[in-house]
Amino acid sequence: MNLYYELIAAGLSVVAYVLIVAAMLRSGESMNIATWVIWAVLDGVAFASAFASGERVPWMIGVFTLGAGIIAILSIKNGKWQWGWLEWVCTTAALLSFGLWSLGPVWSLVASSLAMFVGGLPQVVDAYKSPWQQSKLNWGLFLASNGISLFGANLSLMGEWFYPTVGVIFNTLILGAIVISPKRA
């Protein structure tokens, strides 16, 4: 991983998380609790897996771990619990991904990245249903962060390119949900 690109990606992620946390503190709103708790746990797994697979310091994933954890805590504190069939499906998929860990750190990174994608689907649904509660700027920063990280990745090492690729796909999906929602502002 090119350290220069990874630090830029991490910096963009910090800006996005600061904006989200500031907005949450200002408004008292919460994000989808299931999504952010799943992301906090799985980002931590992805961070450990990336580090174990040989990435020197996966800065962007580290920022995602810390940021998702803070948002999960604020969402729980602000107390807007929503737990339906989609949250159960996503949580189950996230738990099933742990089975691939026995195959090694790269496969653990793949499993946790895919589980984060599935675990994020409730947030995509929320973005479509309530696009005014989402920030295109924040999701655009996450998209740019993952894109820059992918650009700096060694494409011959799956442990370097898989996580940001999933991030690019997910953030494109969530931005699309915001843009195509009939309820957009």
Image (tube, rainbow, N blue to C red):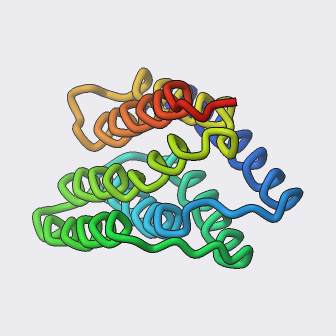
In the image, taking residue 98 as reference, residue 85 lies left or right, namely right
Residue at 77%, 48% in the rendered image: 18
Residue at 43%, 58% in the rendered image: 47
Image coordinates for residue 130, horizontal then vertical, percent: 60, 45
Image coordinates for residue 46, horizontal then vertical, percent: 37, 57
Image coordinates for residue 17, horizontal then vertical, percent: 69, 48
In the image, taking residue 59 as reference, residue 101 lies left or right, namely left
Image coordinates for residue 178, horizontal then vertical, percent: 55, 33
Nearer-the-camera pick, 125 or 73: 125
User: The C terminus lies in which quarter of the figure?
Assistant: top right
Q: Is residue 50 above or below residue 170?
A: below
- Residue furthest front in the image: 182
Residue at 48%, 37% in the rendered image: 174
Asked whether residue 57 is in view, the answer is no
Nearer-the-camera pick, 38 or 79: 79
Which quadrant holds residue 49? Answer: bottom left
In the image, taking residue 176 as reference, residue 133 lies left or right, namely right
Asked whether residue 84 is in view, the answer is yes
Residue at 50%, 65% in the rendered image: 40
| Count of number-bearing discs | 0
Nearer-the-camera pick, 17 or 62: 17
